[in-house]
Amino acid sequence: MERRKFLGLGLAAVALVPVSVSAIDFRKEKPDAWTAHKVDEAIKALYGDVKAEDTDKITLKVPKIASNGGAIPVSIASDLDLKSLAVFQDANPESAVIAYTIPENGIVDYMVKIKMKGSGEITIVAEGKDGKFYKTAKKLEVALGGCEG
Amino acid sequence: MGNMKIKAKVKGDTLKCKVQAKHIMLPYNAAKKKGVDANFITYIVGKIGDKIIFEASTSQFVSKDPIFKFKAKADGIKKGDKLEMTWTDLSGKTVTESKKIKGL
């Protein structure tokens, strides 16, 4: 079975795969999510007008004080059955940072290093396979802003 | 080794991966100041054979020479299997590299 490269096509990926929604390039499918300035707007552009419930079932780890704003380690883990998970922050000109599509055999346990211009709050919004949306957020301080390359 | 440092190891029933790509990840603001085009990885995917085990759409706010750590269930992974990582950036460049999975 071929789950093929949707990179150049921009088509909805659901056609071939019954349960999981893999092979999604969110940048092509939801371009507005990446230009939205405010976190709420970006969430809306990515997922629509959804009501995400606060959950403690997604673990978000960020340093309380990030010494280097250019490389802040963000760890996300969850046992929830999720389809996708997106990371936003409110310190940069645009708020969307990264959006993961969780594959069938995927385990939600990610670490990524991100840039933040200054102190702020990181918000995670995730789409569950149950159709519900979940969110969690953490504030952090950034000692040296890291958006300027 | 190429552009990416790929580490993939099976421990018990979990595959643990750490990938670092070499990329300037230059955001629009910084690019403007330098008088060049912004360029950053916009999409990254990890596959074992035909199966996608990691996938993310990324922005200019992921760090330079980004590191991604992720996990997947190890069932079905056999000795000799490789983790194939592909990234695409704003300029349209695509890089694919693979590494044999350890621990099997």
Image (tube, grey):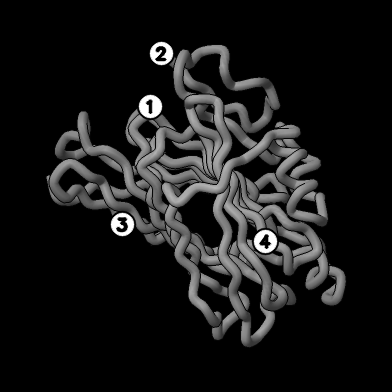
Quick one: label 4 or label 2, which is nearer the N terminus? 2
Of A8 and A118, which appears nearest the observer? A118
Which amino acid, mark 4?
Gln
From the image, state whether disc 4 or disc 2 is nearer to you: 4
Residue A1: assigned label: 2
- Mark 1, Cα crowd under 10 Å, few <14 / some 14-19 / many 20+, is few
Residue at screen point 79% across, 46% down? A41
- How far separated are the C-alphas under marks 1 and 2? 8 Å
Give the quarter of the figure containing the N terminus of chain B. bottom left
Res. B12 in view: yes
Are the residues flagged by discs 1 and 3 in contact, CB closer than 8 Å? Answer: no
Q: Are marks 4 and 2 on the same chain?
A: yes
Quick one: label 1 or label 3, which is nearer the N terminus? 3
Q: Are marks 1 and 3 on the same chain?
A: yes
Residue B50: assigned label: 1
Are the residues flagged by discs 1 and 2 in contact, CB closer than 8 Å? Answer: yes
Which amino acid, mark 1?
Asp
Residue A89: assigned label: 4
